Each structure stands twice: as C-alpha cells, then as structure tokens.
Amino acid sequence: MKLVRGSVCPDAEGLKHFSRRMREYPEVFERATGERLYEGTLNVNVGERIQIKEHFRIHGKELNEQEDFLFEICRINGIWAYRIRPLDAMGGGGHGDHIIEITFSRKNSVFNAFEYTIISR
C-alpha cells in the first residue's frame, strides 16, 4: 500500500471529458467496474508522479476515443474508488501522473475536502 496526500484541483482545471464519456457510455463503465459510476472525476494534484498500477482497462474504441483508459482500484478517505488514467499511443494522455483522476460509484460530501489519502491495492 502507498499512502499519498493531495489537493483537489479547482473545477476550472477540468474539461468535463469524463462526465461526457460516462453520460454517453454508462454501460461500458458499468461492464468494466461492475457498478454505475458517478458521472465525472475529481482531479487530485499529488505533487509527484505516481505511475498507475493497472487493474483493468476500457479500450478507446468502446468509447469512440483514440485513448485507452487504465483503471486502478484505490481507497480515498476509506471509501473504495477508481483512479482512471487516459493513455494514448505515445504513452501520454490526461493530466499526467502528478494529477490523478478519481471517480466513485456515488457522490459524497466527504470529497469536498481538500486532503486525500490514496491507498492503492
């Protein structure tokens, strides 16, 4: 397990790409995770590059996208969550590995706080 603290990025830094993808293709995300996810992600700046530990992925063609989407199961303040890392053919994508994108199966007010502990399995 690795414990990491980070700060939620302001809403202005997100482009809402995951909200759109999750709204347009909810069945793809549900098939991959086994549950309906809350639309969108929180972008968390952890201040250092943290390489994703892939547990499973959604292939871009399933979402009509060029990138694949790697998923890592993690816990945020004790609640199960998913880190999603877009990955393009050149090995980049998304915001990079210092800003991680987190999604949950439901919205919860505990996530409005600015400190997160991420525990990767």
Image: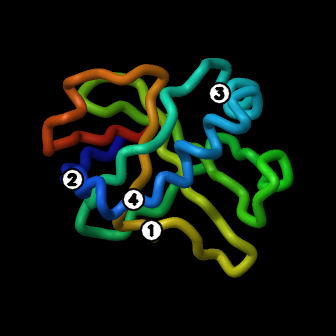
Give the secondary structure at mark 2: strand
Residues tagged 1 and 3 counted as in contact (Cβ below 8 A) = no
Residues tagged 3 and 4 counted as in contact (Cβ below 8 A) = no
Q: Residue under label 4, please give it.
A: 14
Badge 3 amino acid: Thr
Q: Earlier in the sequence, mark 1 or mark 3?
A: 3
* Mark 1 closeness class: few <14, some 14–19, many ≥20 residues within 10 Å: some
Give the secondary structure at mark 4: loop
**In the shown orientation, is residue 50 left or right of residue 40?**
left
Q: Quadrant of the N terminus?
A: top left
Residue 13: quadrant of the picture: bottom left
Q: Residue under label 1, please give it.
A: 95
Badge 4 amino acid: Gly
Residues tagged 2 and 4 counted as in contact (Cβ below 8 A) = no
**In the shown orientation, is residue 60 left or right of residue 42?**
right
Query: Looking at the image, which is closer to me, 28 or 3?
Result: 28
Residues tagged 1 and 2 counted as in contact (Cβ below 8 A) = no
Q: Earlier in the sequence, mark 3 or mark 4?
A: 4
Residue occupying the point 48% across, 22% down: 105
